[in-house]
Image: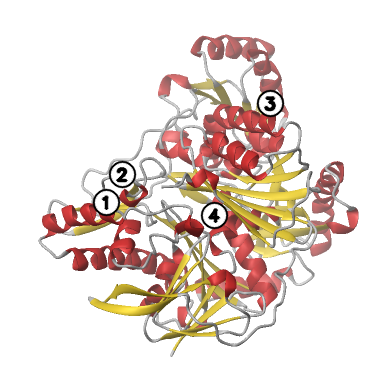
Amino acid sequence: MCDPAAISFLMPRRRRTPPRFVRIGIDTGGTFTDFVVRDGTDVRIHKVLSTPDDPSRAVLEGLTELFPDAWDGEVTYGSTVATNAVLERRGARVCLVTTAGFEDVLEIGRQARPRLYTLEPRVPPPLVGRPDRLGVRERTTYAGEVVTPLTAAELRRLLYRVRSRHPQAIAVVLLHAYARTEHERRIGRALAALGVPVTLSHMLVREHREYERTSTCVVNAYVAPLMGRHLERLACGLRRRSLRVMQSSGGAVTSKTAAREPVRTVLSGPAGGVVGAAALAERLGIRKVLTIDMGGTSTDVALIAGGIPRRSEFTIDGMPLRVPVIDIHTVGAGGGSIARCDAGGSLRVGPESVGADPGPACYGRGTLASVTDANLVLGRLAADRFLGGAIMLDARRAQAAVERLARQLRLSVRRTAEGVVRVVNAAMIRALRVISVERGHDPRAFTLMAFGGAAPLHACEVAEGLGMQRVLVPALPGVLSAEGMADAPRSRDFLTTVRLVDPSPARLARLAAPWQRRGVTELRREGVPRAAIAGQVSALVRYVGQTHEIAVPLAADVRARFDAAHAHAYGYADPSRSVEVLALRIEVTGAVPGRRRLARCRGSRRVAATVRHRLVWRERVLDVPLYQREVLPPRMRLEGPALIVEYSSTTFIPPGWRGRVDAERHLLLERR
């Protein structure tokens, strides 16, 4: 068996030493770390096994294999460090400093019951224990008026109390600090003497809602030391080459900013996939797209209808985070998801995963049956074509793992393997329904875009489950997330609270202008040309007296836009009622040079399959053609059933489906 760390695929290949300035996108997944290198007109892709104990090791090893000699370039990196630290509860010891009397906001939370019928609901414990939540005597109103001043004596007392707790990071969240920042800034200057990362709420979340603001700042402080050390190791390994980190909102920031505000990177990996998918959909003129990104440990889905979908808040492990993110729904259904028999004798798949170590049984080290093993047993993976033939999958180990599960379920091996695939498909169908049907969208009007290493294997059957007719498998589908990172714009996000009733659009524009200028200045310092910088302002609006707001683009007709958005979301609107603008969200982006299209090629409409291949479909053994995708010419038409293999993924076209290769080598599949 070959070492997967020794794999590289270049399309097209041009040898030069040393290479020119390159742009590199890197996506760290649960099983593989993906690389996309843009070098002039060349696109190079590479995969290595992830190293969960230290993700930077896989990144630096992969770069060394790609560039054994000197190189120069810019790296944009999608990290799971912050996500895993929160989910696995292995972050820093945090001390929370807040206004006296509000120490328990973090634990009280909201009066919401996610499991309505649970008699004894249990929630995860807060990241900060009660002894480490310290109150300080000060008070400011929502309008920014000081009620209780912060005295020098109180500052000295606070410094002594915090020092005695020996924190590794500090979160400072004072009541209404978004309206008046003076007290937080003074506390921040005093606590800087302790030499640990300090998160000030007004620098991170400058808006109301104390619980969400506190939760966000605590999570940021919780992962800051770990993320800071991780990015420092990467920066040292890159030897001063430019390092940027993907944000959950779809833009890239410097590693220094990411280390200071790591909470903004919690969804950075999936965000890269949506950015890449949105760019491809726009270029192909497809307006309505459902994306399915199936990797080794999870599947991420999103709905794109005219632009990248974003929201202002999401939840991780029960904790709300008030930062801009791409609207992504994630389920524990990946190629490495473990298949097992539960206490009632039913088949379960995921959310637990075998990860990169030991990996699926067919990788040669694991023993538990996974989705990848089931696909290999069914013949939907070609054992000698995995990752371009660099890894020979162990079919006997996969068969043995599925056999053990089959005995527990009292089923045949074939029925068990097909059951694993059906269960994981059902999980992905449910996820897609959440972002489409449950939000008033008909999935039958959308195209399903499948990417990630495993999604093209399942895409057609998932589409059938939703009544969809079209599937798009991009060129190089297994690395689309890394491709999106390589093309991600530089960005700055700001939010400022205004709390105005029926303001004019001109007044709102004046309030947003200083933040736009700040964003432009910061991007110019990073070398982004002024002509490549654009800004967008959204107003967070609600009817006076309402609890929640709706984000609408700031324009001359902002009021009409809000009424229309409210009617769409809630079924009614009241144009005669006063509205309150709570805050303005400002996004400033600097685009990178346009992404290159894959070269258009001429060729015959049909190419003979390289070999015949046997696979199982609905308990029937089928003899199907197996194609090597890299040699399929544009305009070629394919009839299912068929299997298409390539370096980064495998596509299964079941009976009843047909496909064609377009001018950019994307694969378009349709139900007959």
Residues marked 1 and 2 touching at CB (< 8 Å): yes
Question: Residue 163, relative to residue 42: is it above or below?
Answer: above
* Residue 309 visible in the current orientation: yes
Identify the mark nearer the N-term, 2 or 3: 3
Quarter assignment of residue 104: top left
Residue 308 place in picture, x, y as percent: 63, 64
In contact (CB < 8 Å): disc 3 and disc 1:
no
Lower sequence index among marks 3 and 4: 3
**Cβ atoms at labels 2 and 3 below 8 Å apart:** no
The residue carrying mark 2 is 366
Spot the residue most to the right.
530
Instruction: Report the mark closest to the observer, 3 or 1.
Output: 1
Distance (Cα) linking label 1 and label 4: 31 Å
215 relative position to 532: left or right: left
User: Label 3 is placed on what type of residue?
Assistant: His
Residue placed most toward the observer, 373 or 529: 373
Q: Is residue 497 visible?
A: no
Q: CA distance from mark 3 to mark 1?
A: 62 Å
Q: Mark 1 or 4 closer to N-term? A: 4
* Tag nearer the camera, 1 or 2: 1
Give the foreground label among 4 and 2: 2
Q: Which residue is mark 4?
A: 270
Outermost bottom residue? 672
Determine which quarter of the picture holds residue 629: bottom right
- The residue that label 3 is drawn on is 183
Tell me the amino acid under the disc marked 2: Gly
Secondary structure under badge 4? helix
Which residue position holds label 1?
397
Q: Is label 2 in a helix, a strand or a loop?
A: loop
